[in-house]
Structures are given as structure tokens and as C-alpha cells.
Image (tube, rainbow, N blue to C red):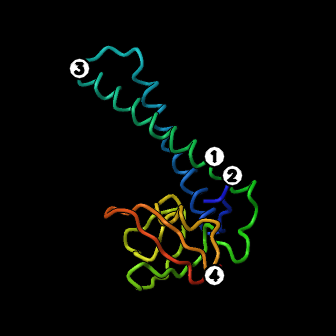
């Protein structure tokens, strides 16, 4: 991983901004429901609903803060550097067993696309800032792994 904030490509930036807008809308609705229930006399089920909404509000606040921090860091980082792995890079790696794989480093996971590697995953974190020829090590479910960066594309 690099020492400073990580750059972000245009598609990931748009996706994060869209998610942030959706989260803010959802947060406003949950907060309004929580305000409407405040002070109302009710039974234990009503109290449980109120607690659940408060937990949901806290979860939304954490995710909003995380996205805002990421967007702020991306703005400070500027554009991804040429030749070094960043968010949005397409990277070919050769694993210890000799197999090669081309992955796309992204901000958001997509379970339907096995070629995506999120930047906060063990492999994604190890790749950030690396260049062709570098060897990376990371922790996989089966233990420590290493791979060689074969090529980096934008």
C-alpha cells in the first residue's frame, strides 16, 4: 500500500458519490422516523423498533463518514500515476503456482465479476502503488501468498 491517499478512477468516483447520495437520503428517512417516535408512549415492540432504527442510523453514519473520508483522500491524491497500481488499474499477476490472472482494482465489490479485486482486500492492498516486476505478499485464507506484478494498465 502507498503511504498517502489513494487516487480513484472516474467510474469508482461516480459510484461512491451515488452511494453517498443514497445513504444520505436513507439516513434522513431513518432519522425522521426516529424523531417521530421520540417521546411516544409505546410497548416493548415500539422500544425495540426505536433501538433498531438508532442502530441503523449509527451504521449509516459510519458508512457515510467512510465514503466522505475516501472521497476527500482521493481528491488530495490526484490522478493515478502511470505505471503504478491504483484504483482503476488493470493488473496481471503471476502467482506462486505459475498461474496468471488479470484483475481490475476497484473500490466496490461485485460478486458477479471475479476479475474485480477491491482496493481494501488483502491482494488489492498489496498491489496498490506497485509496478511491473514487483513482488507482493498478502494474507489469503490459506495462509501467506505472494505474486509478481507482470503488467499494469490504466
Mark 2 surroundings within 10 Å by alpha-carbon count, few (fewer than 14), some (14 through 19), many (20 or more): some
Mark 4 surroundings within 10 Å by alpha-carbon count, few (fewer than 14), some (14 through 19), many (20 or more): some
Side of 87 relative to 109 (left or right):
right
Q: Position of residue 78 (x, y in %)?
A: 76, 61
**Whole-number angstrom distance, CA of label 4 to CA of label 2:** 22 Å
Mark 3 surroundings within 10 Å by alpha-carbon count, few (fewer than 14), some (14 through 19), many (20 or more): few
Q: Position of residue 89 (x, y in %)?
A: 61, 74
For discs 3 and 4, the disc positioned in front in the rendered view: 4
Instruction: Check residue 153 in the rendering and tell me which mark sits there, or answer none.
Output: 4
- The quarter of the image holding the C terminus is bottom right
Q: Nearer the viewer, residue 37 or 18?
A: 18
Q: Are marks 4 and 1 in contact (CB under 8 Å)?
A: no
Q: Residue at x 56, y 78 (%)?
A: 149
User: Which badge, 4 or 1, is on the more N-terminal residue?
Assistant: 1
Side of 61 relative to 17 (left or right):
left
Instruction: Check residue 69 in the rendering and tell me which mark sits there, or answer none.
Output: 1
**Whole-number angstrom distance, CA of label 3 to CA of label 1:** 37 Å
Element carrying mark 3: helix
Q: Quadrant of residue 54?
A: top left
- The quarter of the image holding the N terminus is bottom right
Element carrying mark 1: helix
Instruction: Check residue 44 in the rendering and tell me which mark sits there, or answer none.
Output: 3
Amino acid at each position: 500500500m502507498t503511504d498517502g491517499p489513494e487516487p480513484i478512477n472516474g467510474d469508482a468516483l461516480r459510484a461512491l458519490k451515488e452511494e453517498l447520495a443514497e445513504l444520505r437520503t436513507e439516513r434522513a428517512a431513518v432519522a425522521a422516523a426516529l424523531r417521530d417516535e421520540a417521546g411516544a408512549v409505546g410497548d416493548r415492540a415500539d422500544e425495540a423498533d426505536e433501538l433498531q432504527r438508532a442502530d441503523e442510523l449509527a451504521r449509516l453514519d459510519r458508512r457515510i463518514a467512510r465514503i466522505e473520508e475516501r472521497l476527500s483522500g482521493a481528491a488530495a491524491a490526484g490522478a493515478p500515476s502511470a505505471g503504478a497500481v491504483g484504483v482503476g488499474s488493470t493488473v496481471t499477476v503471476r502467482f506462486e503456482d505459475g498461474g496468471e490472472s488479470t484483475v481490475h482494482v476497484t473500490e466496490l465489490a461485485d460478486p458477479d465479476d471475479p476479475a474485480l479485486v477491491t482496493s481494501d482486500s488483502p491482494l488489492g492492498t498489496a498491489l496498490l502503488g506497485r509496478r511491473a516486476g514487483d513482488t507482493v505478499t498478502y494474507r489469503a485464507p490459506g495462509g501467506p501468498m505472494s505474486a509478481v506484478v507482470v503488467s499494469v494498465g490504466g
